[in-house]
Structure formats: structure tokens, C-alpha cells
Amino acid sequence: MLLLLFLLLLPFVSPAERCHPNDKNALLKFKESFLKPESLDPLQSWDPVFDCCGWALVECDETTNLVTGLTILSNVSGSIPDAIANLTHLDFLRFHKTPFLVGEIPPAIGKLSNLRYLEISWTSVSGHIPEFLANLKNLRFLLLSFNKLSGSIPPSLGTLPNLYALDLSRNQLTGSIPESFGHFPEEDSPITIILSHNKLSGEIPPSLASVDFSGVDLSRNNFSGDASMFFGTRKSTSMIVISRNNFKFNFSRVSFMESLVTLDISHNKIYGSIPSQITDAILLQELNVSYNRLCGEIPSGWKLKYRPEGFDNTSFLHNPSCLCGMPLGPCKP
Ligand SMILES: *[C@@H]1O[C@H](CO)[C@@H](O)[C@H](O)[C@H]1NC(C)=O
Ligand SMILES: *[C@@H]1O[C@H](CO)[C@@H](O)[C@H](O)[C@H]1NC(C)=O
Ligand SMILES: *[C@@H]1O[C@H](CO)[C@@H](O)[C@H](O)[C@H]1NC(C)=O
Ligand SMILES: *[C@@H]1O[C@H](CO)[C@@H](O)[C@H](O)[C@H]1NC(C)=O
Ligand SMILES: *[C@@H]1O[C@H](CO)[C@@H](O)[C@H](O)[C@H]1NC(C)=O
Ligand SMILES: *[C@@H]1O[C@H](CO)[C@@H](O)[C@H](O)[C@H]1NC(C)=O
């Protein structure tokens, strides 16, 4: 009976160590590199006595037992440790809401060639977005929002062959969108780019016309000129948000994809009228063309799949009084 109990408990008493010693060493070095983590910090549970594949925030591959995922959500303070470079099999790396994480994105990150998901968000990481991120050819997600990044967007990011989502929002980025962003290979995975809340400026490179973006958010920058290249009936874009910039182009000349769900062009200097072909966008749920220089009659007869009640006047306000028709006042004959 006792023997049976012992045999039943055996796997719990002395579990086989799955963790590879190199990975464990790298994780321990990684932990030690941070300045005095607080006692409640999840990293404090990283005890070398136990299998690192069981540590909080660490993920190991089921078959190889190599460390493939690391999520740091804590009050660690200091910069991203170079020891991360020795976790060579990482495909998922996330630093999120780590306000005391400072310094620049280190070259060590550029050595993690298996990364498919890299997120550094809501941190105090500063400096430029490094060119070497373009070496991470497997990247699908590059999410660097809510940091203190400055400088311009490296053109080399446009060469990432597998990128699916690029979020650089809420930093202090300057300069313009690189021309190379017109060359994202988009055949099997339309890309979403989110560059909102930065200090970006200049005109949008015409090369972007050839990309079928899944979504584009350029709001709250100081872009100017034409943004009509994001439109077109043959595209499958679901979100176009270009509000609060300095865009100035003739809206009469754009055409709308049926896939459009969110369209916000508010707070620009966009002129012309709202083309009646917009009624093809039956999936549209959010529309805002307010604070522009639009004129002419608002198209009627929209049959919106998810918004049968249509749009109220706040979607159209603050244009010249020649923008008219429901839900604004009637057009003067
Ligand atoms: C992290 O720090 C913040 C602010 O100092 C504090 O409110 C929070 O409780 C801390 N979190 C942990 C897990 O220690
Ligand atoms: C990576 O691992 C090697 C071998 O274990 C070690 O010599 C080196 O110092 C480690 N590098 C870092 C940055 O921790
Ligand atoms: C925005 O760009 C325009 C030129 O297009 C420039 O005149 C203006 O000063 C810029 N505004 C800011 C806040 O940088
Ligand atoms: C805008 O484009 C329309 C259609 O091509 C044209 O009729 C109109 O004159 C243009 N408006 C301006 C101000 O250029
Ligand atoms: C917008 O609509 C609301 C409610 O339908 C109405 O009270 C308001 O006067 C309208 N505003 C303008 C500027 O037309
Ligand atoms: C449109 O944008 C304006 C300005 O930002 C805002 O006041 C208004 O509430 C928005 N309307 C809708 C329907 O989103």
C-alpha cells in the first residue's frame, strides 16, 4: 500500500528536469541583470531548484523542452539584459506594462532569429528603433507602442517578409513613412500598420498604393498631402484611420472597398464631396469625416449591415455649410 502511494507520488516528488541547462543559466542571468526586483515580482519565483519550464512567465516547447516564450509583466527595473541573446529558441517575447524598464532596445534582441512575436509596450524604453530588427526575418508581430522611442522609422523594416502587424504608436517618432513600406509582400497575409500618436510628417510615399493593407492607422501625426492611395475597390482593407493630420486631397476621387468597417478622416483639410459609391461599403460601422472641407450632398440610401440606423450628425459636423443632406440639414436648391 505504502509502495503504491510512493509510486503514485513519484512523478511529483522528483519530476524530470525538462529545462535545458543553457536556457536555465540564461534565464537566471536575465533575472540577476535587473535591479532589485520587488518581493512580489513574478521573477522572484524563478528558483534554480525547480525546472525552469515550470517557472512563471516561461514557456517551453512540448517536444524539445527548449524555452520558446517569455512574457515579462512586472516591475523589473533596469534595461533589457544581454543574457536574452542566449535564449536562442525564443519565438515569443513580450515586455508589457513594465514602467521601470529603461534603456534602448539592445543588439541582443537582433540575435533572436526565431522570433515571430516581439512586443515591447507600455515601458520606458527609449532611443531609436534599431535597424537590426530587420534581421528577424520570421517576425509576424512587431509591437512597440507606448514607449519613449524617438528618431525615424528604419526603412529596413519594410523588408521583413512575414510581417502581419506593425504597431509603433504612441512614441515620439519623427520623419516620414519609408518608401520601402510600399514593398511589403502581402499575398497571403495583409499587413496592419499602426503609427498613431507620434510626430511623423511628410507625404505618404505613392508606393504604398500597391499594398493591400488590412488596416492603417496614421492618426495624430502631422502627415500632409494625399492619402487616397489607401483606398480602392480592389483592396480588402477594413480600417482606414488618418484623423488629426494635415492631409489635403480630393475625396471625390476615392473609391471604397466593400470590406471597410472603420473610416476616420476627421480633422484634416480634405475637400471635394463624399462619393456615392461609399454606399457599397455595407460593412461600415464607424464613420467620421468631421472637421474637413467637404461639400456637396451626403449620399443617401445606405444599407448598412451592422448599423441599420445609419450615422448621426457628429460623423459629418464642422465641414463647410455646403455639406448637406441627412443627417445634416437639407441641401439648398
Ligand atoms: C508595480 O509598481 C506600481 C507603482 O509603483 C505598484 O502600484 C504595483 O503594485 C507594483 N506591482 C507589483 C506586482 O509589485
Ligand atoms: C551565453 O552563454 C555562454 C555559454 O554558456 C556564456 O559564455 C555567455 O556569457 C552567455 N552570454 C550572455 C550575454 O549571457
Ligand atoms: C506640420 O507640418 C506643416 C507642413 O506640412 C508645418 O507647417 C507645421 O509647422 C507642422 N506642425 C507641427 C506641429 O509640427
Ligand atoms: C475633385 O474631383 C472631382 C471629380 O474628379 C472634380 O469634379 C472636382 O472639380 C475636384 N475638386 C477640386 C476642388 O479639385
Ligand atoms: C445634431 O443632432 C442632434 C440630435 O439629433 C441635434 O440636437 C443637434 O442640433 C444637431 N446638431 C447640428 C449642428 O446639426
Ligand atoms: C468624430 O470626430 C469628432 C472630432 O474628433 C468627434 O468630436 C466626434 O464625436 C466623432 N464622431 C463620431 C461619430 O465618431
Image (spheres, grey):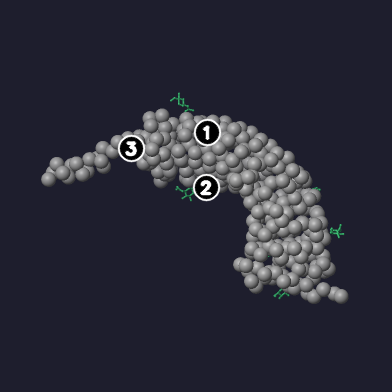
Nearer the observer, disc 2 or disc 1? 1
Q: Is residue 306 left or right of residue 312?
A: left
Kindly tell me whether mark 3's CB lies below 8 Å from ligand 2.
no
The residue at the point 76 percent across, 45 percent down is: 206
Q: Quadrant of the C terminus?
A: bottom right
The residue at the point 69 percent across, 57 percent down is: 257
Q: Is residue 178 visible?
A: no
Q: Is residue 97 left or right of residue 47?
A: right
Task: Reply above or below: 255 against 321.
Answer: above
Task: Give the secondary structure at mark 1.
Answer: loop
Task: Choose top left, top right, bottom left or bottom right for residue 152.
Answer: top right
Q: Which mark is residue 112?
A: 1
- Mark pair 2, 1: CA separation: 22 Å
Task: Reply above or below: 314 against 206.
Answer: below
- Mark pair 1, 3: CA separation: 25 Å
Q: Are marks 2 and 3 in contact (CB under 8 Å)?
A: no
Circle 2: residue type = Lys
Label 3, on which residue?
50
Task: Give the secondary structure at mark 3.
Answer: loop
Tell me where residue 225 appears, x and y as whole percent: 80, 50
Tell me where residue 54 appears, x and y as whole percent: 36, 41
Circle 1: residue type = Leu
Circle 3: residue type = Phe
User: In this view of the protein, which residue sits in the foreground, 97 or 8?
Assistant: 8
